[in-house]
Amino acid sequence: MAEAIPDSPPRTQAQQALDAHLLQSKNNRRGIILALCAMALFVCNDSLVKLATSSFSTGQVLVIRGLFATSIMLTVVLVSKQGKSLRFMFTRLLMVRATAESMVALCFVTSISQLALADLTAILQATPLIITLFSVVLGIEKIGWRRWSAVIVGFVGVLLVVKPGGHTFNIYALLALLSCFLVAFRDLMTRKINPAIPTVVVSLTTTLSVVVVGLLLGLESWKPIELQPTLYLLAAAMFVSAGNMSIVKAYRIADPSAVSPFRYSVVIWAFLSGFVVFGEIPDALAIIGTGLIVASGIYTVHRERVRARELTTEANLSV
């Protein structure tokens, strides 16, 4: 008769804490990899959209890519058996967020047809700084001189990329800046959406709103459908859908403070794609400005993490 295997001794609280720490470290590493992949996928989408804008109008690009993306999102909803959640699509907050996102898409696609990919991507990295600014103006939080300094440095970087008064400063650069403010507004609205509403339903509502805006814009300037740019937009829809799912997964399994700094890897991907696909070489001021934007953004993330740790310590001491 086989001998009974003795039960393992109960794990101490310290051992359980170590296990939890090791598991979270593993999830953080997975989250970082997912974030890096998501940023690469987003740049692939941007590059393909830029290629398609040489053949299609802005509205046409929004419609064609939007229809492909809608099909992908609907498939995900049905496969994940979340069809009942579609009833939330037309709630007020989702409609407001979708409207903001459609304006972001409009500004972005219009800008990308005329701006260098690396420059446009660098400008968009000012969004976290604008969110910080909005949070102060709306009374959501207070920030100290360190984070104010980071915001100022970031905007100096934006000015170096945009170059007011220079040949690169035009309506398309202003549209890129406007998209940053719209993204900041969109993200602040996202925080108020009922967490019970699946992310894919939120994304589907957004995608449909982009299609509607594209139709309103593209009916008068519609051009004959060509195979190659249409395939570009099909691939773009696949890339952006995969990128969205990757970044959502990253933030769900990993600590936001671990993932957020790696979002700035999108600048590296944009530089590479701009050079390889379009032969774009940013000038020295744009490179310096991009560095300032990224550095200020990473420092802002760092200060948020420090502040969260300080608040946690204060709460523990008050108990």
Image (cartoon, helix red, strand yellow):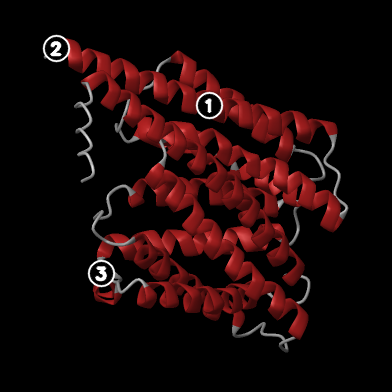
- Residue at 77% x, 80% y: name it: 228
Tell me if residue 46 can be seen. Answer: yes
Label 3, secondary structure: give it: helix
Which quarter of the picture shows residue 264?
Answer: top right
Q: Earlier in the sequence, mark 1 or mark 2?
A: 1
Around disc 2, counting alpha carbons within 10 Å, would you say few (fewer than 14), some (14 to 19), or many (20 or more)?
Answer: few
Q: Residue furthest left?
A: 319
Residue at label 1? 151
Among the two numbered marks 2 and 3 on one chain, the one whose residue lies closer to the N terminus: 3
Quadrant in which the C terminus appears: top left
Residue 274 spot, x, y in % from top left = 79, 51
Residue at (69% x, 54% y) in the render:
172
Tell whether 116 sits left or right of 35.
right
Q: Quadrant of residue 166?
A: top right
Label 2 sits on residue: 318
Mark sitting on residue 88: 3
Q: Secondary structure at mark 2?
A: helix
In front: label 2 or label 3: 2
Vertical placement of 304 versus 107: above or below? above
Between 223 and 198, the one nearer to me in the picture? 198
Q: Amino acid at mark 3?
A: Phe
Residue shown at 49% from the left, 75% from the top:
72
Discs 2, 3 touching: Cβ within 8 Å: no
Q: CA distance from mark 1 to mark 2?
A: 32 Å
The residues bearing labels 1 and 3 have C-alpha atoms spaced at a distance of 36 Å
Structural distance between the alpha carbons of marks 2 and 3: 40 Å
Residue 132 visible (yes or no): no
Give above or below for 208 relative to 194: below
